[in-house]
Image: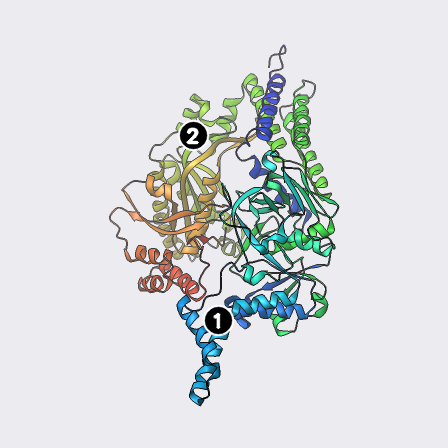
Amino acid sequence: MSRGRNVPLWTAIVATVAAIGLLAMHLWVRPLPGLDALDGLSIDARFKIRGPRAPESDRVVIVGLDDETRRAYPEVFQTRRGWAQLIRALTKYEVKVIALDLFFSAPEVFLPADLDAEVRAADAEVTAATDPVAQKLAGLVHRIANELRGDEVLAQAIAESKRVFLGAFFRPGVGAPREAEPKTLVPARHGESADAGGGGSRRPVHAVAVDTTLDSIGGGAIGAGALNAFRDPDGVTRRVPLAIELGGRHYMPLGLAVALYDLGKPGDTRYLAGDGGVTAAGMRLPVGIAASVSLDMLGRGKLPRVSAAQVLAGTAPPSALAGKLVFVGMTYSAYDKVQTPLDPVADGVELHATLAENVLARRTLHLAGPLATVLATLALCGIVIAAQLRRVRRRAYVPPLVALAAMGGYVVVAQLAFGSGLILAIAAPIVMTVLVLAAATIGGLATEGREKAHLRAVFSQYVSKTVVDKVLADPARARLGGERKELTVLFSDIRGFSAFAEGMGPEALASFLGEYLTPMTDLVLESGGTLDKYIGDAVMAIWAAPVDLPDHAARACEVALRMQEALVGLNKKWKAEGKPEVAIGIGINTGPMSVGNMGTHARFDYTVLGDQVNLGARLEALTKEYGVDILVGEATAKAAGPAYVFREVDVVRVKGRAGAAPVFELVGRVGVKVDDRFQAALAAYRRREFSVARETFTALAGDATAEIMAKRCAELAAAPPPEDWDGVYEQRSK
């Protein structure tokens, strides 16, 4: 390194200036892709480190319409009379509030409108009948007419209870409201509100319509509130709006409305659209993006719960309900689930109950302002700059260690602040610091001339000598930090290996893995692929990096088929030797990935990262769930070309990924026949024709995947999914 100029130091200074500029753009102009998502993940991590907590207020109780209620009292799910029965039962328990996490936005309909009117008219006309037969018919007509008055029965129950709060769902959009404000929505208004036209990203969501209970049903309710919540792009719900705008008026959420009622100050709120907070009953509730508040989640099972079946049967403990704020919602296994930082399948009603608990306990979370984020970034980047001083940078590994220690210290501070209710941004300061550190490290590598030595040391482990020579001739092929490329990744894994390995000694297990991994690795290298790593018995390989291969998808598919063929020979050999036979599952995916040397200049690995890589790993896990040997992503099936035969298996939302993706079985090479009945059954399944789909799948005897789909169709036919079911299967295992 030149003694006249400290290149890493000046690189770090320039990178810091650029990083602060990027941060300013992120905070005040336009968010940088991925940073908000990373911050969401960091908040989830802070919740998990803190762990679940017990509610500080014993006022809030959830009454769940669970699976036991569906079995014992199905009328609650089916009729307005059932709901009236539940409201009356809760009223008898002398609860203080019955907050419904739902609404009755349309009349209950059992008969066509004209027939309904005729029955009601006939009921009024036959009451004076004297003939015995006529009296019997009159009684029957009266009973039928009475069954048609479910809305009236529910309305009477709500009015007599004098403690019901109704839910409302606001529909965002642009333009004027589509209809007049329902009377049942009036109690949900903020006590005082105004709109000065400012606030930027903190402005509330603008709605054009609202789904709420009909005035004829909910006229006797004492309160109402919004049921909306915000699901972040990663699928996790962390926030609820404290204000939503409709027709120039601002409405509060259900949890806040109930909490204010319990404090004896219903509707005591003041809100200026776009302001940094809502004043409620004398306390200041901070708001962030879209006038939302970050919930201080409690975790699974922390809020007291009572089954609606117990309430209806009269077996619920009176002490669990008397005087409580009861939130009533669906809690059975297949409805209204949300993912929260502490629970991947929380019940939606928990969000509103949690907000009420947060307000009553005064534990709402506060987001630190953008200035705090800038100062934290400057401090961390300043430490990275100081670490580049020659008296500190005596060893190449010292600056990264200093930077990591500083970032670790900041994370600890952020966790401590979180425990006090303050959310400090972690993603932006850490990412900017990492960028500065990477720039300084690259500057050091450039002046110290160590890049080729590192590349040869790393690549000689998992690619052929020819590939290493090509990389050394053009080091940009494997740049530090990676580059975005279209690649194909393959994951293979021995099924049930953990149980299998338990029965073998260390020496025998090592020998077995050597026998298995050697031919599998040879197939990868012979095809021009790169062995990314071994993960125990698993093999991870990539194609088209570091050397470009235009037919990388086809090469990966060919290797997968040859791996299965090689395993047949190995199993025959092991069987003859008295050893157990094994099966492997293979997942392949093609798409944009970040590939390169990940790490620091002192130690790094050549690998791939990204969403498409994760999808490839999940496809391998899915082979067990669908009973197939090889599963590929849609892009692989399209890119492999006509030499291979695929069949679509399903559309799956894999673990850790919000979006859904079609998955395909690699059946074999061209010439292999695929039974068209499978696709016909799959189409019927997606049309919700579960019985038809099950029959067709069942007819495909010997097809393991068809048997699995037939079983799923039987389950869905017995318990149909909600109307908005999209046909996407949720992966159960990793």
Q: Position of residue 359 (x, y in %)?
A: 70, 50
Toward the viewer: 264 or 102?
A: 264
Quarter occupied by residue 29: top right
Which residue sits furthest left? 671
Q: Earlier in the sequence, mark 2 or mark 1?
A: 1
Which residue sits furthest bottom? 132
Q: Is residue 381 above or below residue 522?
A: above
Q: Is residue 20 above or below residue 223?
A: above
- The quarter of the rendered structure image containing the N terminus is top right
Residue 357 visible, this angle:
yes
Crowd rating for badge 1 (residues with CA inside 10 Å; few <14, some 14–19, many 20+): many
Q: According to the image, label 2 marks what residue?
A: 546
Toward the viewer: 140 or 239?
A: 140
Q: Amino acid at mark 1?
A: Leu
Apparent side of residue 247 relative to residue 317 in the rendered image (left or right): left
Apparent side of residue 685 relative to residue 79 in the rendered image (left or right): left
Apparent side of residue 635 relative to residue 50 in the rendered image (left or right): left
Residue 76 visible, this angle:
no
Toward the viewer: 171 or 24?
A: 171
Disc 2 element: loop
Identify the disc placed on residue 356: none
Disc 1 element: loop
Q: Amino acid at mark 2?
A: Pro
Q: Position of residue 671 (x, y in %)?
A: 24, 48
Q: Position of residue 144 (x, y in %)?
A: 46, 76
Give the spatial CA distance, label 2 vs label 1.
71 Å
Quarter occupied by residue 69: bottom right
Q: According to the image, label 1 marks what residue?
A: 148
* Of the two numbered discs 2 and 1 in the rendering, the one whose residue sits closer to the viewer: 1
